Amino acid sequence: MGMSVRSNAGSAAPAERLPMPPRWPLLGHLPQLPSGRLTQYFTELARGYPEGIFEIDFAGYRVPFVFSARLVEEVLDERRFRKTMGPPLSSLRALAGDGLFTAEGDEPNWTLAHRILVPAFGQRARQAYHAPMIEVASQLLAHGRCSRGQWLDVSDQMTRLTLDTIALAGFDYRFDSFGREAPHPFVAAMVRVLSEAMRRTAQPRAARWWRWRARRRFQRDIAYLHAVVDEVIRQRRAQPSPVRDLLALMLEGQDPKTGARLSDENIRYQVITFLIAGHETTSGLLSFALHALLRNPEVLARARAEADTVLAGREVPDYADLERLVYIEQVLEETLRLWPTAPAFQVAPYEDVQLAGRWPVRKNRRITVLLPALHRDPAVWDEPERFDPERFSPERRAAIAPHAYRPFGNGSRACIGRQFAMMEAKIALALMLAHFEIEAEPDAPLRIVETLTLKPAGFRVRVQPRA
């Protein structure tokens, strides 16, 4: 038994110690954390904690992880809990500063940028994004036709697609990824930065000083990424565009309440945020979706039949066609249930709390919401490991409690680009199914690479144009 804190009902109750795996003296759980697969490790660990909570000791700093729908419902209450940041996200402040993804909720630039940029993801804006999305998806098709019979790395192909899509649709900038033999250097630098941020999570803070080569590489990569983004902004200033895209809003938009504008430094951080968050998660979503489809032939057949019906023999869909891709959207939603590509976020209580009337958490202590485990909560999901897009059919979707499914985060800090991402993913998946027969490597196990996001590793396919 531990301290006594205020319970949810407002009455004092004796608190229990948070459950915790065995740990080392001083170093806590650090020696047993696998730096290359932290999310998978925590998700596997969650199976042994049916109450939906455990605590991890990061060499003296303890972080509760919650993953039952019952507890997550409580911590998503924005009146009592706020979005906060810790490792690995806090390690990216050097890269993305106070951009939307890495800003604390009380930072002025988060509120300013959010109000300015919300119109960039409304209905009218999404219609304008249709043409660049189709242009880049058509480049993916052309590349597939030229590569018929060759084994293609799916995550690499989807990364090319989504990087070029957010760059063209959001900033009228072309990385020309499908015209390159190797991925654009921006991608390599970004992956190294994200991997290093994740690696630091499982290491004591002092480690970065004796890992001086990694620290210098981290700094060089960040400088390169900033230089690329500064060039994107410089080109737009030199040649203003009539297109009202994300970059135009950043450069010219004013806060509708105060009239304030974004600073040049913050514009850089917002562009970085959208280039990274806007392509890294969606490429993972498409990669996992293809993996699931190729291992579930009945689901694949139904999704392909829908794509064929909607396209009706045309090369690409019109904007109005997208709302008819109902089953393909269900496939994407079920993919995000099993493998939410942004697999966790953190909140902190404004005051001392006692979760479920039992578990004490002090004011401002970070709590990690572990999404892959939440999305497998057996109290919510029947056969949680089974891939079943029917969970998200119109009839059953309404019965899913919002707190049980959170692939895009929560509340005011939920992903601002979620509708952009789903629109892009629907277009790409429908076109790939309609135009190609896709063959996966036989008996290849699902391996997952973790940076800040999740992606299949070494997942390869061959494509043949359909008759």
Image: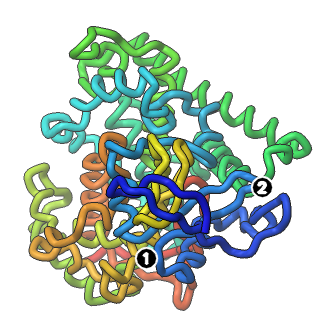
Residue 165 in the image: x percent, y percent?
Answer: 37, 44
Residue 445 located left or right of residue 109: right
Protein image colouring: rainbow
> Can residue 240 be seen at all in this image of the molecule?
yes
Q: Is residue 235 above or below residue 41?
A: above
Quarter location, residue 238:
top left
Identified at 40% across, 65% down, the residue is 356
Task: Check disc 1 and report its element: helix, strand or loop.
Answer: helix
Precedes in sequence: disc 2 or disc 1: 2
Q: Position of residue 273 (x, y in %)?
A: 47, 36
State the residue position of label 1: 291
User: Where's residue 83, x and y in %?
Assistant: 44, 43
Kindly indicate the quadrant of the structure image that contains residue 333.
Answer: bottom left
**Residue 44 image label:** none
Q: Position of residue 170 (x, y in %)?
A: 34, 34
Residue displayed at 57% across by 78% down: 44
Identify which residue, 51 or 44, lies in the foreground: 51
Q: Is residue 442 left or right of residue 118?
A: right
Q: Quadrant of the C terminus?
A: bottom left
On residue 59, which mark appears? Answer: 2
| Residue 341 visible in image | no
Q: CA distance from mark 2 to mark 1?
A: 37 Å
